[in-house]
Amino acid sequence: MQNIEAIGIGQNHYLILSAIIFSIGIMGVLFRKNIIMMLMSLELMLNAINLTFIAFGYFNGNLNGQIMVFFVMTLAAAEAAIGLAIAVMIYRKFNEVNIRYFEQMKG
Amino acid sequence: MSTFIISNLWFYVLALSLIFFAFKVVTSANPIHSALHLVLTMMGVAGLFFHLNAQFIAGVQVIVYAGAVMVLFVMVLMLFDLKHEFNAFAKGLVSGFLKLMSVALVVGYLVGVFLESGESKGVKASLTTSGDQTSTQLQVTRDLAQLLYTKYVLVFEVLGVLLLVVAIGAVAISRIQGGTHAKH
Amino acid sequence: MGSDIFEFSINGLKIIIIFMMMVQIVPLLVWVERRGSAYIQNRFGPNRVGPLGLTQLLADAVKFLTKEEFVPQGSYKFFFYLAPVVALIPAALAFGAIPLSIPIQVEAFTMMGRNWGPYTFPFQSFELGLGVVFVLGASSLAAYALLLAGYGSNNKYSLFGALRASAQTISYELSMGLSIVGVLLVYNTFNFTEMVAQQSGPLAFKFLGNDLLISWLPNWGIFYQPLGAILLFAAFFAETNRLPFDLPEAEGELVAGYHTEYGGFKMNMFYIGEYGHMLVASALMTTFFFGGYTLYPWLTPESLNQALSSFSPTQASLITAFSLHLVFLVKVLFFLWIFIHVRWTLPRFRYDQLMDLGWKTMLPWSLVNAIVTAVIIVLMRSHWS
């Protein structure tokens, strides 16, 4: 038998895992009606992307992947803050967070 | 075969629990259940980062993402006091089916790209010496800092300005006229 | 965890003992608090149950354990049961990463006909290269216990208390992180053991190209970061929800805040978590600023090893480790006494005063501290020819 211990966890394992989590995130954004749920699914997608960056960085011996994750994480936190502020304002005015009510731009 | 599974068991356990938690994030009826499962997902991702020789990024993920951003999400959800969403998912069979098919297409495309692209990189040669010793964890952090402050210093400063703008913008969006001490 | 069964079992035992250390210090602290507060307020504390009232806590524990288990009607049962556990876990994890003494070196010996090789047992639950980052991360997870308790109780006072408490926690985490940045700039490492090793010498620093040495003062962090120490200590008061920042648990205003609906042992677990966080805060203060487990002129690893050179290496290492651990415990108990003393001396902050203090005073001062530290380090350590 070949050297089975050499079959370790390769780059493809991490990439497929992050692809699955990314698509679960897309499912969340498409299927949920609550604004906050859509923001959370967006965070899930960003986490999958971070995993991809670090996996590429590790398997190519490059630290630029980790630097990118720094920046992506910072931007994700900023965007979550603004998204939540907007959601709070919408709830305060309309008392409703279901996006189906806001689909038609009227008034 | 058994050595293969046992030495990589940690990855499969972590990966499968991550997929389970992510699925529960998207399909829970109670938004707070989703938020808490998202916290668990982020901790799982931090665990994977730890094994990919990115221990500092794993720590930052726990501090920033799971410890501050998600606390903010849970706080806002508790303020809203939403009842269970009985109709949590989008209505309509045809549009639902189209959305599901598009997601399946994206998954298939991504997975196909990875599986067909060139040679698959296996285990790195230095896997056994990296990440578990305390000195290498510090060395990776020092190299990261070196890179961040010399090659990417412009991006760093721009992100600082962006965070300032975001902080002021968030306060400006959601402020009450006259401040919190105003009389209504 | 270990390469063979001896190391494995010793490491496992060590993790359990350190966790029990955190849990068992709670009765002692509660006794000190009740008697100490009583003397501050010119009355007696509990003094009937045992000698000096020491077994009062044992009686309290029995009382807690035999109370009725109840869950409020209409609450989310899973969150209600989960919150006390989540209150306990971050404190235990953070305490495990802080070194309590120098590692114990055991020489090779034979027992039961087998050669057990030389071992080194670090005097902490697990040794991490990035100890500071781990402790900060574990502390920031403590906000979830408050939120889960408040939400799972189906009680609007609990919910308000929980929201206030978690907003306070994440506001003061910023000042805490920035003060720790000042400390990291001075020591240039994330590892606690290296930080303590740097503090076990005489006070020596370069200043504008000259080397200054003051041989009668130890190289403690408090001389390098006085403002950072004060800010960090104040931020720790807010993180652990102790007075003067304890509006979330205020009895008068919020009917005991987020743990209103808890009784019996679940309430006790919240207190174990709070005292555990106090213990972690005191341990961090001693490790960063007051020399950790060393005391320069008399009790450093080198001087003790020299003094004990007549014993065998294993015994010398054990005696050194335990005496340095005593030094650490004395310092930690001093800081715990300051926590308790401040609680019964200062009045409570109002919530908007609390948030103003966190964002408008401590955050700017922490930023100034970090910037001034960086500038001074560049001035001091650069090469002047």
Image (cartoon, grey):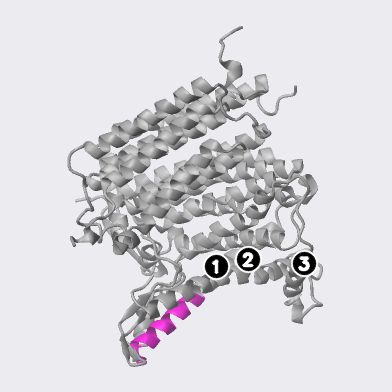
Please name the predominant secondary structure of the magenta segment in the image: helix
The correct choice, above or below, for C183 with respect to C315 in the image is above
Q: What's the distance in space between the residues labelled 1 and 2, CA to CA?
A: 9 Å
Q: Nearer the viewer, residue B16 or B96?
A: B96
Q: CA distance from mark 2 to mark 3?
A: 14 Å
The location of residue B147, given as percent across then percent down, is 26, 42
Q: Nearer the viewer, residue C96 or B104?
A: B104
Could you tell me which residue is drawn at 59 percent across and 48 percent down?
Answer: C144
The residue indicated by pointer 2 is: C337
Identified by mark 2, the residue type is: Trp
Q: Which mark is residue C38?
A: 3
Image: magenta residue range: C309-326
Q: Residue at x 65, y 49 (%)?
A: C79
- Indicate the position of residue A66 as horizontal and vertical percent values: 31, 43
- Residue B58 visible at all: yes
Residue position marked by numbered label 1 in the rendering: C332
